[in-house]
Structure formats: structure tokens, C-alpha cells
């Protein structure tokens, strides 16, 4: 299994942080109620290696008692939890917010990206709401 990471691209380089190391570092920050930005629904950063059904299942089974990690309006860890919160009608979620990130754990040259995904977190939210509302079964999503 690949290590859970958070990456940002800047100036042709990819800066990558280890999520377990960020979690350890985040313990010094208080838990706040973070407003989930509506712009989240227009994004998609999940790997193409996982299926939509994998992500839908992770959203449905996400533990909302566990805070997310954020930095300057970006979700470092916790998109599945944010989508579940939105599906349940919440606008805020517990978060540990980094005012400054520590130095990245890895810096590499950015790879040439493929075509951007036509799928967004908003699409995933609609799918999860349909599953939770009984209009679609997870088995139907697995068959896609």
C-alpha cells in the first residue's frame, strides 16, 4: 500500500508531505470548526488508481468524530469526511488548521499531467447522497 501523502505543485516541482507525520505535528493545534468551502465541489484530486465505488464507500464509512487537517483553505487530509459531512447537511467540520506547513518530506520534479478528470467532488457528493437516500445501491456503482 502506498503511503498516504499530501502534495502541492509549485514552479514545476511537487512538494510532498507524509500524512502520518503531519498528524503527529498537528497535535499542537486546537481543533476548530472549519467551514467547508463550496469551491471544494468543483475540484478532484483523488488518484485514478482507485475506483469511484472505492471512494463512495470511503465517504460513506468516514468517521466524522475525527478532525480533518487544513492549511490556508486547502484540505490536507479529510476530503472523504468533508463529503460525508456535506451529504449529511453539515457546513462545518472539526479541523486542525496549520498556519504554516513544515518543510516538505519530499521535493520532486512535477510529472506531465494527463487529462484532468471530468469528475468532481460535487459529482461524488451527489452519488453518495443518492446511495444514502436509497436511490442507488453501492453494488450498482461497483458494476460501473
Image (tube, helix red, strand yellow):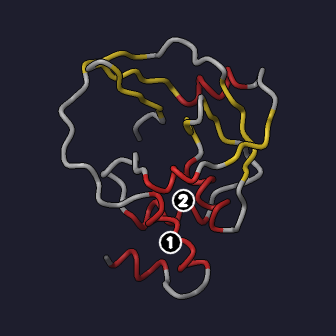
Pointer 2 local density, CA inside 10 Å: few below 14, some 14–19, many at least 20: some
The answer to which of 115 and 102 lies nearer the viewer is: 115
Classify 35 as above or below 60.
above
The residue tagged 2 is 58
The residue at 63%/67% (across/down) is 87
Q: What x and y, as percent, mark residue 32?
A: 79, 37
- Helix, strand or loop at label 1? It is helix
Q: Quadrant of residue 73?
A: top right
Q: Which SS class for mark 2?
A: helix
- Extreme residue in the front direction: 38
Q: In this view, does 136 lie to the left or right of 95?
A: left
Q: Marks 2/1: CA distance?
A: 15 Å
- Left or right of 66? Residue 130 is left
Extreme residue toward the bottom, this view:
135
Question: Residue pushed farthest top?
Answer: 103
Residue at 61% from the left image edge and 83% from the top image edge: 133
Task: Say if 89 sits above or below 49 in the image.
Answer: below
**Residue for point 44% across, 54% down:** 42
In the rendering, which numbered label is found on residue 77?
Answer: none
Q: Mark 1 points at which residue?
A: 126
Query: Residue visible at 57% across and 53% down?
Result: 38
Lower position in the chain sequence, tag 2 or tag 1: 2
In the image, residue 39 lies at what x, y percent?
51, 50
Q: Quick one: quadrant of the N terminus?
A: top left
Q: Which of 79 and 18 is in front in this view?
A: 79
Q: Which of marks 2 and 1 is in front?
A: 1
Find residue 46 and report its horizontal and vertical position in percent.
40, 48
Q: How crowded is mark 1: few (under 14 residues within 10 Å), some or many (20 or more)?
A: some
Residue 8's place in the image compared with 11, above or below, is below
Amino acid at each position: 500500500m502506498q503511503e498516504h501523502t499530501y502534495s502541492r505543485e509549485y514552479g514545476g516541482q511537487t512538494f510532498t508531505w507524509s500524512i502520518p507525520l503531519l498528524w503527529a505535528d498537528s497535535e499542537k493545534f486546537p481543533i476548530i470548526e472549519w467551514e467547508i468551502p463550496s469551491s471544494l465541489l468543483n475540484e478532484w484530486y483523488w488518484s485514478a488508481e482507485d475506483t469511484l465505488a472505492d471512494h463512495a464507500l470511503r465517504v460513506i464509512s468516514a468517521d466524522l468524530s475525527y478532525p480533518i487537517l487544513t492549511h490556508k483553505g486547502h484540505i490536507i487530509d479529510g476530503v472523504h469526511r468533508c463529503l460525508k459531512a456535506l451529504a449529511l447537511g453539515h457546513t462545518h467540520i472539526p479541523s486542525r488548521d496549520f498556519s504554516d506547513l513544515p518543510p516538505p518530506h519530499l521535493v520532486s520534479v512535477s510529472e506531465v499531467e494527463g487529462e484532468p478528470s471530468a469528475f468532481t467532488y460535487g459529482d461524488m457528493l451527489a452519488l453518495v447522497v443518492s446511495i444514502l437516500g436509497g436511490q442507488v445501491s453501492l453494488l450498482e456503482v461497483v458494476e460501473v
